[in-house]
């Protein structure tokens, strides 16, 4: 029986049981395709990273004696469509069985289901053998419950995998969550180690993308590509994080600074989301390093990191499979505005937005608070249509794959799901941004003013948003305090706030 096995660009799991078998009756297929480069406009570094990682994975498979067909973008047999490429290969190689690992994107899951229904040969699906939960675990865990509180799921995962537990019921350190310790502003107390980067020449890959006239956003230094694109790279980044960055990760994981791109963040998200490195091995490595250096590293640094991978990441994937496909179009707040053009140029006088967007364009990266409380906050306060916000986030970030992007964007950031992921909208005036960042001190606008010409736009936008959406949040207990403060604003002051907010929303190019 001659088998054809499909490997998608985010299924580069070296530990998969498939690869224990290097039978000459099995052909592995990977492909760079316009289907995947064109469904949204991606950052150039994101496209390069996936293409480079796929090539490295194909080389690794070949080095183990496997038969591999790898279609680069300009391969003469590449039809640029997954189903058409597979049909051609099945016919050309007289394949008698087609196998694939379950995709993590609903779009590809549906495409492959439809494709296999057209085949007259045997087909079989496999797990990616990667995630710590199944597609349905979250739904089963919250069966009968009114809210999907992540914290309860996270605690269950800690127990299930015996992560940072002293007994089967008691968390190490006496607390489940050290989030209150993870909110320090960066004040330059220490020297931040340079990120574990790479200086790879990706000129050939970039040229292939350019010659195909693929539309991309952002920029790239072709001779000094800086992201891990092999398992060896990923392990190197993990080791570097443990040795140099973990010691202060938790403290400053929410901090923002215009001169610090990565702070103490790991830069592992692309490697994780393409499956070059396993989430459980990352967690165990970090905890092992902490146990060996307890006199230097506090448990709050480690728990803050573990929570993101063991809790939040698995939770978001569970929500995705629980709520798709309707989740992709939900817009509970009925926001309809366009995303301002400066999201593609960083040309704005708002310092926090300028730096967060420019960093995203230059590096295909921004950490979660920049995404949530700067770019996402502004998009929500200006009532931007969540479809536009989704497309931007999915395209611009190197780690953005729909299962993790859309739940964070449409749910956590834009509250478009009406509270499935977040119990309240993550919005703020300029005061929070000033509290957690060093953006405001050198900004064109004054963070302490609301309606003057030089007032921080976030201030009027915040109170205007609460005023316009008040009826929607009246029964939300977490919004009561802010709505109470809203009611205390004098009518003449509120009129000025609304006027300025409307000017910002209608004329974003002026700000």
Image (cartoon, helix red, strand yellow):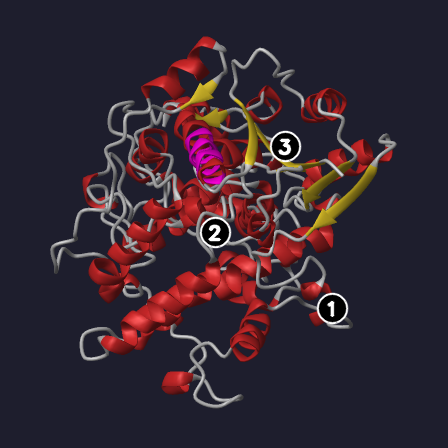
Image coordinates for residue 295, horizontal then vertical, percent:
18, 79
* Quarter of the image where one finds residue 281: bottom left
Image coordinates for residue 107, horizontal then vertical, percent:
70, 36
Answer left or right for 75 relative to 416: left
Answer with mark 1 or mark 2, whichever residue precedes in sequence.
1
Image coordinates for residue 455, horizontal then vertical, percent:
32, 39
Is 104 in front, or is 171?
104
Decide: is 364 above or below 231.
above
Residue position for label 3? 336
Q: What secondary structure characterizes most of the magenta part?
A: helix
Quarter containing the C terminus = top left
Cα distance in 3D space between marks 3 and 2: 18 Å
Task: Single out the mark in the foreground, 1 or 3.
Answer: 1
Residue lying at 58% horizontally and 56% vertically, measured from the top left:
316
Residue position for label 1? 140
Q: Residues within 10 Å of mark 1 (few under 14, many from 20)?
A: few
Decide: is 36 above or below 138.
above
Judge whether residue 422 can be spotted in this image. Answer: no
Residue 148 colored in magenta in the image: no
Which region of the structure is painted magenta? 50-61
Quarter containing the N terminus = top right
Image coordinates for residue 239, horizontal then vertical, percent:
28, 57
Q: Residues within 10 Å of mark 3 (few under 14, many from 20)?
A: some
Answer with mark 3 or mark 2, whichever residue precedes in sequence.
3
Q: Are marks 3 and 2 in contact (CB under 8 Å)?
A: no
């Amino acid at each position: 029986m001659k088998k054809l096995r499909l490997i998608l660009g985010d299924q580069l799991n070296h530990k998969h049981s498939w690869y224990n078998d290097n039978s000459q009756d099995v052909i592995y297929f990977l492909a760079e395709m316009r289907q995947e480069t064109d469904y949204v406009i991606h950052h150039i570094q994101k496209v390069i990273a996936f293409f480079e990682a796929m090539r490295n994975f194909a080389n690794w498979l070949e080095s183990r004696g496997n038969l591999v067909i790898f279609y680069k973008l300009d391969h003469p047999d590449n039809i640029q469509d997954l189903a058409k490429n597979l049909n051609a290969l099945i016919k050309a190689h007289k394949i008698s069985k087609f196998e694939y690992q379950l995709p993590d994107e609903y779009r590809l899951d549906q495409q492959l289901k439809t494709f296999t229904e057209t085949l007259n040969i045997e087909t079989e699906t496999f797990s990616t053998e990667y995630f710590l939960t199944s597609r349905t675990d979250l739904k089963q865990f919250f069966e009968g419950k009114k809210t999907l509180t992540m914290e309860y799921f996270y605690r269950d995962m800690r127990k299930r995998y015996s992560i940072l537990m002293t007994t089967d019921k008691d968390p190490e350190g006496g607390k489940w969550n050290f989030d209150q310790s993870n909110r320090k502003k960066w004040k330059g107390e220490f020297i931040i180690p340079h990120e574990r980067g790479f200086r790879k020449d990706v000129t050939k890959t970039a040229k292939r993308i350019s010659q195909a006239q693929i539309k991309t956003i952002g920029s790239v230094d072709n001779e000094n590509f800086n992201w891990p694109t092999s398992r060896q790279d990923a392990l190197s980044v993990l080791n570097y994080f443990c040795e140099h960055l973990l010691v202060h990760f938790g403290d400053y994981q929410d901090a923002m600074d215009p001169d610090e791109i990565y702070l103490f963040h790991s830069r592992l998200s692309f490697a994780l989301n393409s499956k070059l490195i396993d989430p459980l091995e990352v967690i165990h490595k970090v905890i092992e390093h902490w146990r060996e250096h307890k006199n230097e590293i506090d448990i709050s640094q480690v728990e803050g990191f573990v929570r993101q991978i063991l809790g939040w990441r698995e939770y978001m994937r569970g929500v995705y499979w629980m709520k798709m496909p309707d989740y992709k179009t939900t817009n509970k707040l009925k926001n309809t505005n366009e995303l301002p053009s400066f999201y593609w140029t960083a040309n704005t006088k708002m310092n926090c937005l300028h730096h967060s967007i420019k960093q995203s364009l230059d590096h295909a990266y921004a950490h979660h608070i920049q995404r949530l409380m700067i770019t996402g906050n502004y998009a929500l306060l200006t009532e931007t249509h969540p479809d536009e916000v989704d497309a931007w986030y999915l395209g611009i970030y190197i780690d953005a794959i729909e299962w993790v992007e859309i739940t964070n964007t449409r749910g956590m950031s834009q509250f478009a799901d009406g509270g499935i992921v977040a119990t309240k909208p993550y919005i703020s005036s300029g005061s929070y941004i000033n509290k957690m960042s060093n953006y405001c001190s050198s900004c064109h606008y004054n963070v302490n003013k609301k309606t003057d010409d030089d007032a921080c736009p976030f201030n009027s936008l915040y109170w205007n948003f609460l005023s316009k959406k008040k009826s929607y949040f009246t029964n939300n207990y977490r919004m009561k305090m802010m709505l109470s403060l809203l009611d205390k604003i004098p009518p003449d002051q509120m009129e000025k706030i609304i006027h300025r907010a409307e000017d910002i929303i209608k004329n974003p190019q002026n700000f």
